Structure formats: C-alpha cells, structure tokens
Amino acid sequence: MSERQDIPESPLTRRAFLQSSAIASAAALAGGCASMGGASPGVSPAAAAVGRGLSGTIRVGLIGCGGRGTGAAIDCLTSNQGIAITAMGDLFRDRLDDSRQKLAEHGAAYQVKDEHCFVGFDAYKQVLACDIDAVIMAPPPGFRPLHFKAAIDAGKHVFMEKPVAVDPVGARVILAASDLAAQKGLAVVAGTQRRHEASYVETMKRVADGAIGDLVSGQCYWNQGALWVKPRKPEWSAMEWQCRNWLYFDWLSGDHIVEQHVHNIDIINWAMGGPPVKATGMGGRQERTAPEFGNIWDHFAVEYEYANGSRVLSMCRQIPGTSERISERLVGTKGVCDPSGTIQRGKTVWKYEPPGGEWVNPYEQEHKDWIASIRSGRPLNEGRRIAESTLTAIMGRMSAYTGREISWKWVLESSTLDLSPPRYEFGELPIRPVPIPGKTELV
C-alpha cells in the first residue's frame, strides 16, 4: 500500500457547520472520488437505481475505522451480497491502516483504493464526496451530528452507531436530519441491534398486544467492570489523546450512561411507546478518579417517569470487581417480562424459541435489514427514535450531574447545552471539570 499524504486538519467548528449547507453541494475531490453522476440532486445512486427498477452493487463508505466501525463493515459484508466497501476515512492513519488489513482478511479491502482512503478531521467530507451510495458511521458519538447531517445533505443512506449525540443541541440536529432523510427517501438504521433481534422483536410484539397487561413500571441495567483506557503519550496533543481515549470525555462519549446504557434505555422507550416526561438522577465518580479517566462518572441511577405514570429505574456502572447485570425488565398489571425473550403471567411462562433452533446474529441482521430496505425502495428510518433514546440518556445524565429534576419538554426544546470543542484541530483542549451535583449548572 502506497503512502498518501494526510488531509490537513480543518479548524471547522460544529457551530459553524450547522449554520452552513455547503456540504450538500461539495464538489468531487481530487484523488479518484467522483460525483453522484446521473442521480437526482440529494438522492443517492442506490435510491435512484431502485426507482428505475435496477439492481447492482451498493457502494458503501466507512467513516470511523476503529473496532466498532471495522466490525460494522464486516457485519454488513457478511450479511449481504452485492456490497462493496469503496471508501474509508478516520481521524488517525494507524486506525485506518489496521482497518484495511482486517477488511482484507475478509476479502473486501481490494475494492478500496489508496486514493479513496482519507485521514484527518475532514476525512468524512472526502468519503461522502466519493462515488458511494451509503455510509457506515462509527466515530466517537460526539462527531455523529456533524457527520450525519453531512451524509443526509449529500444524499447517502446511513448506518450509524449508537448513541447519536452527546448533548441536546446535537440531538436536535439528528432529529432534523432524520426528517430530511425521510423526505429524500434515504434509509437510516442505528446500531441498536436489539431492535433487530428476533427474541426482542417477538417478545415486544406480545407486550404491545397486552401479554402482561398495562405497563406500570420497569428496570434497566448496564452494570459491569472496567473497560479499556489509553493513558496519554508524550507525543499526543490534548485533542489527540482525548480522541484516542474518547470513552472518558463528555464531549466525545456523552458518559457511559449515554454511550453504553442507551441500549437498555432504548428498550424501555420501545415498550413505553416513546420517551419519558421527566427524569431524576444521581451518581458519581468513586473508583475511576485518575487523570486517564477524563471527566466522566463511573456510576448512575436515574428514575424516569413516563406519560402513563409508569416509573422506571435505570442503573449503570463501570467499576472493576463489581457484579454484572445487563438486562431490562417490564412490570405490567398481569405479569412481568424480560424483553430478551421471557414473559411470565402467574405460573405460566412463555420463552422465545428461535425457529429451527438457529440463533441469528443481530449485529448482522441490522445490516441485512438496512440493505434490504434500500434495495426494496422502502427505506427504514430509525433516526428519530434513536435520537429520542439518546436524548433520554442525556436527560438522565444532566439530571444526575446537576442534582435537578429535568423535564423532557425542557431538554428537547430549551436546553442550549453544546459540548463540542471550540475548534476541530489538534492542539490544546481543556477538560471540563468533573460535574458536582448542586454546583454544576443546568444549561
């Protein structure tokens, strides 16, 4: 593989980007990337092809080439035929190269030419300007609103990892762009694989049909031990270190209640038919106090109240040496339910059994459903619901950080909290203080 000069980092800010629609009309860039050819403005080639009743290879770009992005690309290739990864971009050269090697092992990277691989803060622009139909997005969540809006403006179908924002400002960007995607006929699928897992789908159908009666309460958990951490190296600027160690900074991950626990919160919202009306939370930073753990907490507990009066306990923890619990539970007037596949009414227990006894990988199924919706001309659009679940998690975090009860209406319509950095460029970047309830301000 020949070496290619890195794309210079742009001093673009998210605020400036969101005030501009220039991305939608970005010209094809040098280095082999082509424009969208004969497709109608704002409509991807894949969508145009479906409209003409044609079939063919769907060209997919990958933005964010870390472990999750590479895994998502492999899942997409494994679960579908007629897919080619043809453009790739990441903030860092080493992650891009590692991803290309892993894709090559699956027989896919030969279609990604050196001139279609990009590095730097602007890499997403170069990928979107290539001759692709769809894009997989898996950088840290803090970049998601910026990248997603650009992809929809450019007329691309999108698979994006969860969560999709880290603050209310970003969540509103996702909501607006998701509505635009619906107008353009673009498919949007999120990495909430439980929504595509047969055991969950079948169980939730039964819950919706009244299998446990009216919902009155619930619980959801993501309690586990430690995760990876990357101490700062002398040659890394503050921005580079934070981006490489992204789990531990609020502007990049949203804290683990948003980055990880959103999976369980999304199931509760699914059962309740939408987001809660208010949240009251607490938590703290007890074990992960060293500098390499940035400014996030290590445990949360939030009570969410829904429109029907149901109250749900949400609990998440990342502390080594502690018990693990990753699950959801629903309580109704006639029974209880584990949404992953069990319903109990008195002594009667129903358990989901996969047809033929074969388990289907939900990480692959979500990509299969995404591509099938593109080919059929009936695009899925999960953008609004994952934005609402993400904002539900953000609301819980904000309540815990500040020690204040927070309403859905306020966080959706009025909060001006924007965690994005002043500029997207390598260099110094101060770390916000660790939040302290009663002192951290509500924004």
Image (tube, rainbow, N blue to C red):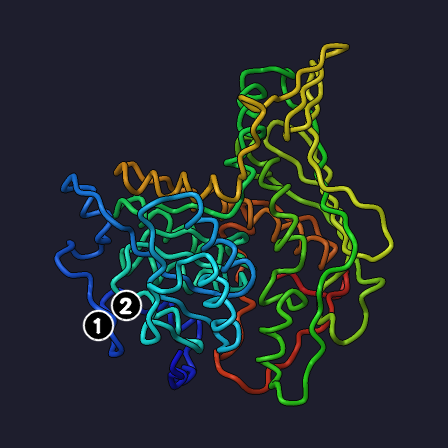
Q: Circle 2 — which element?
A: helix
Is 131 located above or below residue 331 in the figure?
below
Outermost residue to the right: 321
**Which percent across, then down, holds residue 106?**
46, 56
CB within 8 Å, label 1 to label 2: yes
- Asked if residue 49 shows in the view, the reply is yes
Q: Is residue 255 left or right of residue 408?
A: right
Tell me the residue that label 2 is attached to: 129
Of 108 and 147, the residue lying toward us: 108
Amino acid type shown at disc 2: Ala
Of residues 14 and 417, the one drawn nearer to the viewer in this rendering? 14
Quick one: label 1 or label 2, which is nearer the N terminus?
1
User: Looking at the picture, how far across and down is residue 443, in whole percent?
Assistant: 60, 62
Q: Residue at x 67, y 44 (%)?
A: 279
How many discs mark residues in the rendered view?
2
**Type of the residue with mark 1:** Ala
In the image, is residue 203 above or below residue 134?
above
Left/right of residue 36 with respect to residue 326 in the rendered view: left
Q: In which quadrant will I find the N terminus?
A: bottom left
At 64% across and 81% down in the image, what residue appears?
430
**Residue 50 in which image quadrant:** top left
